Amino acid sequence: MKRRDKNADATSRSRGSAPHRWRRLAAAITTAAAVVGGSLVVAASAQAATHTFFVDSLDGSASAAGVNVGNGVCETTAGTCTMRAAIEEANALNLPKGSVTITVADGLTGNIDALNAAAARMQNSRVSNQDAAAHFEITAPVIIDLDNRVTMQTSADTAAALFHVNGPDVEFRNMRQILSGETSIVTGPQTRGFLLDGGETSTERNYFPERFMVIREGASDITVRNYRIQGFYHAANATGIFYVNAQNNTPIRNVRIENVQIAYPTATTCNASNGSGCRTDIVQFLPRNRNVVLDGFTFTNSFVSNLTNRDAFPFSRGTAATSVTA
């Protein structure tokens, strides 16, 4: 695994009532809306209320715990709205698809560093065979749109995934540089209808990241589109950009990769201080598992360049030839 190999080698709280924020919300809905205090915007419609939480802090660990989680307001004890607090609130509300949006406050730029400590994580149980924990745990419908202004890259070689998505109707939009020391996104067995639309992620600082997406048994209707991916450390069958980690024979259904660019430079390095030259397999499977069922995989209108000495789609050879039903 990588670690053995390496040894060898925003100033104020966002207010939903601000006019410019109201205009942005109004453009997204067609019904009459009412604005309430804090970082919560509620829009009335015939179907459901819409909550928009404006992340106004780059703190990667501050929780909403102790501030009445589920009250419809994104707030930590410090009075800020962090990514963790916003996700905790969305999980607690557990509203229908499209009801909750998490975005960034006007003027907020920079990086959210998910700290490498158990208390800073939302999930400290294993979320895949390769990820011992998860910094952010999503279990309910939500749209997260970082507007390509805020990145989420851990500074340490953490053993945790960045996101564990394990619920229905989760959408990521305009997500740039979402990286941990393991997997960027794990889609768990309860994932139904996950969409990543817009943005790019590449390993530049170091070779800590190992997989872009892990797909677990039972997950269905997963789409990645309009995205650019580059890099990720390679360690045989333990790594890959799209990594299928089925732990029983429950089918994974309908994985669609569309308008995705996977591109690698030709003359850079892959080490602890420069990950720009890392390249790994596009698709890989857990090698010890012989009951992977992948029912529906589409890779379309996409572009791959300089994938030197790596596998693209090993569905019919090697381990996959005997362990995968595709």
Image (tube, grey):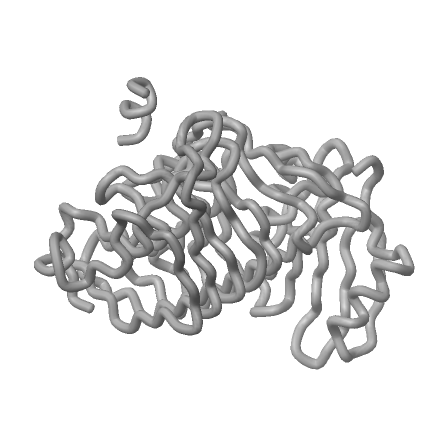
Which residue lies most toward the top here? 7
- Residue at horizontal 73 percent and vertical 42 percent from the top: 109
Residue nearest the viewer, comparing 115 with 306: 306
Q: How many marks?
A: 0
Residue nearest the viewer, comparing 162 with 169: 162
Q: Position of residue 282 (x, y in %)?
A: 33, 55
Q: Position of residue 6 (x, y in %)?
A: 33, 23
Is 96 drawn above or below residue 188 in the view shown?
below
Which residue lies most toward the front here? 267
Q: Position of residue 67 (x, y in %)?
A: 69, 39
Q: Is residue 62 visible?
A: yes
Q: Image quadrant of residue 233?
A: top left
- Residue at horizontal 30 percent and vertical 49 percent from the top: 308
Q: Image quadrant of residue 249?
A: bottom left
Q: Is residue 94 visible?
A: no
In the image: residue 172, left or right of residue 231: right
Is 29 drawn above or below residue 118 in the view shown?
below
Which of the image's four quarters has the C terminus? bottom left
Which of the image's four quarters has the N terminus? top left
Q: Position of residue 122 (x, y in %)?
A: 50, 39
